[in-house]
Image (cartoon, rainbow, N blue to C red):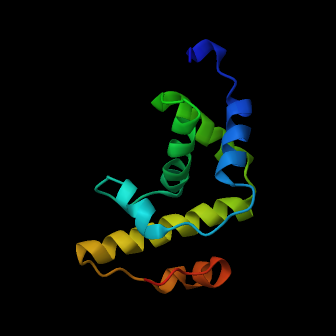
Amino acid sequence: MAHNNVNIPTIAHRVIIIAGLYRPIFRNTEELARNYNGNNNISRFGALLLIIIPVCNSINIYGRNIIRRVAKYIWRNFSLYQRGFFINLANRINRYLARQRGQIIDNSRHVANDMLYGYDFH
């Protein structure tokens, strides 16, 4: 796709529908953590990217800049509740990665999120 002819809102709505992002559903933390290959903790925006990159690739969108623009569009148009889902998802991925690295992290600040969005036990 040429960068000039890209309609970001149309692509974003297509990605949202295919990925089922209008209604947050349970995501497999372990699988997402395996797909994350960074050394640092993942951000909430990074959690969104982990979900939408395979969807973008499935509709033949591979350009890193286009995918980031789509993610930014989605993020800006999400409600606080929808953003909260990705904040919680990033926290769960980071806790999983910390357990894999043998690190101990302070979970006390995540209790409210776990109560609101649930916690996946492994």
The one nearer the camera, 47 or 108, is 47
Which residue shows up at 48% across the image and 30% down it? 62
Residue at far front of view: 58
Query: In the displayed structure, does residue 11 sit left or right of residue 92?
Result: right
In the displayed structure, 57 sits above or below 18; it is: above
**Residue 52, image x, y percentages:** 56, 46
Which residue shows up at 44% across the image and 60% down it? 32
* Quarter containing the C terminus: bottom left
Q: Report the number of discs.
A: 0
The one nearer the camera, 78 or 58, is 58
Residue at far left of view: 102
Which residue shows up at 67% across the image and 80% down it? 116
Q: Quadrant of residue 39?
A: bottom left
Q: Quadrant of residue 55?
A: top right
**Residue 34, image x, y percentages:** 36, 60
Query: In the displayed structure, does residue 83 sit left or right of residue 55?
Result: right
In the displayed structure, 102 sits above or below 3; it is: below
* Quarter containing the N terminus: top right
Query: In the displayed structure, does residue 9 sit left or right of residue 92?
Result: right
The one nearer the camera, 32 or 75, is 32
In the displayed structure, 91 sits above or below 66; it is: below
In the displayed structure, 96 sits above or below 104; it is: above
**Residue 28, image x, y percentages:** 50, 68
The one nearer the camera, 55 or 33, is 55
**Residue 76, image x, y percentages:** 69, 45
